[in-house]
Amino acid sequence: MKKAAATRLMILEKAFELIYVKGYQTTSVDDIIATTQVTKGAFYYHFKTKDDMGLAILQEILKPALANSFIQPLRDHENPIAAIYDLMYGLLMENEFLKVEYGCPAANFTHEMTPWNADFRKVLDEITREWETAMAAALENGKENGFVRKDVDARRVTLFVMSGYWGIRNFGKLENSKSIYLPYLKELKGYLHSLS
């Protein structure tokens, strides 16, 4: 990787970490410059504006990370009931990157930026739709393979599960404790088994 590309990636990674903790709107370009220790000129060489950098974070950092953590596990498992539960348990209880006190970075960006920025809304919608499509496809495959009842509406189940995930992440932020996730996971397990 060339030096300019490495510098750009470093800015994106460190800015993402800072934004995950502080929030997008409360993180200034000066905060990012202080954290990355690049000059203001170097920052603006790589990004025209803070929003240009924010969109690059979504496309180049968040989207691939979510594809690996949220989507691939649904494709790697034959039984979608087990896959969805294992995914949620892993994201909530075991994932080292997703901190309980800061919530889900995609949800945070969605809450913070979609009312104000159409470009952010478009990219975040793409990310959400990819997860939705992967989960619904896993459930449809589960119906074909006998793991899920034929009468189950895969899209409705997907929206319900995704909504629960985003909601319980917010409870986690309020409680600052993973213990709040346990009742959700218990109910989710029961709900998912009812789809068999």
Image: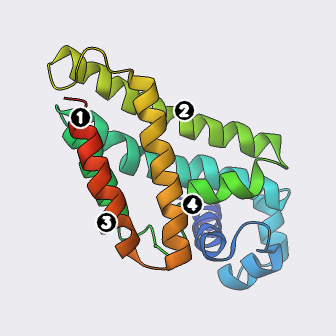
Instruction: Please tell me which residue is depicted at 58% across the width and 72% down the height of the picture.
Output: 17
Q: Which mark is residue 105?
A: 4
Q: Residue 129 carries which label?
A: 2
Residue type at the position of mark 4: Pro
Relative vertical location of residue 5 with respect to residue 121 in this rendering, above or below:
below
Task: Determine whether, in the image, residue 173 is placed left or right of residue 114.
Answer: left
Q: How far apart are marks 4 and 3 (CA)?
A: 21 Å
Residue type at the position of mark 1: Ser
Q: How far apart are marks 2 and 1 (CA)?
A: 25 Å
Q: Distance between the residues labelled 3 and 1?
A: 19 Å
Relative vertical location of residue 85 with respect to residue 159 in this rendering, above or below:
below
Q: Distance between the residues labelled 4 and 2?
A: 16 Å
Chain-order first, disc 4 or disc 1: 4
Instruction: Please tell me which residue is depicted at 25% across the width and 48% down the height of the picture.
Output: 189
Per the image, label 2 sits on a secondary structure element best described as helix
* The C terminus: image quadrant: top left
Q: Which mark is nearer the camera, 4 or 3?
A: 3
Badge 1 is on which residue? 194
Q: Which mark is nearer the camera, 3 or 2?
A: 3
Scheme of colours in the image: rainbow
Q: Which mark is nearer the camera, 3 or 1?
A: 1
| Image x and y of residue 15, in percent | 65, 70
